[in-house]
Image (tube, rainbow, N blue to C red):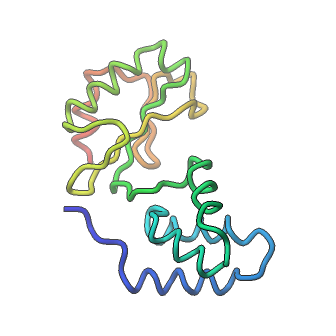
């Protein structure tokens, strides 16, 4: 089962961040970034707390949270598996890799495993086209992989 990040302690941390930024121009972005670090996402209850604290409409916070790809509305797993679907990666077989990852972990793209260990995301160009197709797992980058490489890579995590 995934760990609960929505603790009283984490909301107290968020209160401090809100207090530090309240009244400053452009306060929303730094508060959202810090909230993402604290909770691993900017879920609706986090957005509501920010809305009340900064006196910013919830609709504006939701709009910013869903516009920028670095923000997630749901907690992500300990290991975020990104499969690049940019043109170079796609042409070199990224689709078969994404299908293999999903089969191996028995989950879908965009979902987090019930134990909170893995999240699978389809990404766009990661800037490593010479290594196509590319898979990232957190900060680790795997290039020129084929579907048969997937089980061995996942076993490391």
State the image coordinates of residue 80 (x, y, percent, origin top left). Answer: 39, 47
The residue furthest top is 91
Foreground pick, 66 / 84: 66
Residue 54, picture quadrant? bottom right
Residue drawn at 26 percent across, 44 percent down? 156
Residue 99 placement (x, y as % from top left): 29, 24
Of 15 and 82, which appears nearest the observer? 15
Residue drawn at the location 48% of the way across and 25% of the way down? 85
* 155 left or right of 46 in image: left
Above or below for 6 versus 87 = below
To which quarter of the image does residue 127 belong?
top right
Q: Residue at x 50, y 83 (%)?
A: 13
Residue 2, x across and y down, in percent: 25, 62
Determine the residue located farthest toward the right in the rendered image.
25
| Above or below for 121 versus 44 | above
Residue 93, image quadrant: top left
Tell me the residue at 57%/47% (across/down): 69
Report whether 46 appears left or right of 19: left
Quarter of the picture holding the N terminus: bottom left
Q: How many marks?
A: 0
């Amino acid at each position: 089962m995934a760990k609960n990040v929505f603790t009283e302690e984490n909301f107290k941390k968020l209160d401090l961040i809100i207090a530090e930024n309240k009244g400053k121009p452009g306060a929303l972005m730094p508060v959202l970034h810090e909230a993402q670090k604290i909770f691993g996402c900017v879920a609706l209850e986090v957005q509501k707390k920010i809305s009340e604290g900064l006196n910013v409409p919830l609709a504006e916070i939701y709009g910013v949270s869903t516009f920028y790809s670095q923000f997630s509305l749901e907690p992500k797993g300990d290991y975020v598996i990104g499969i690049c679907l940019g043109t170079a990666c796609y042409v070199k077989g990224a689709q078969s890799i994404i299908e293999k990852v999903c089969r191996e972990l028995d989950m879908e793209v965009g979902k987090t495993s019930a134990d909170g260990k893995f999240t699978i995301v389809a990404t766009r160009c990661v800037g490593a086209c010479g290594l196509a197709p590319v898979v990232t797992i957190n900060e680790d980058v795997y290039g020129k992989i084929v579907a048969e490489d997937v089980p061995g890579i996942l076993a490391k995590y």
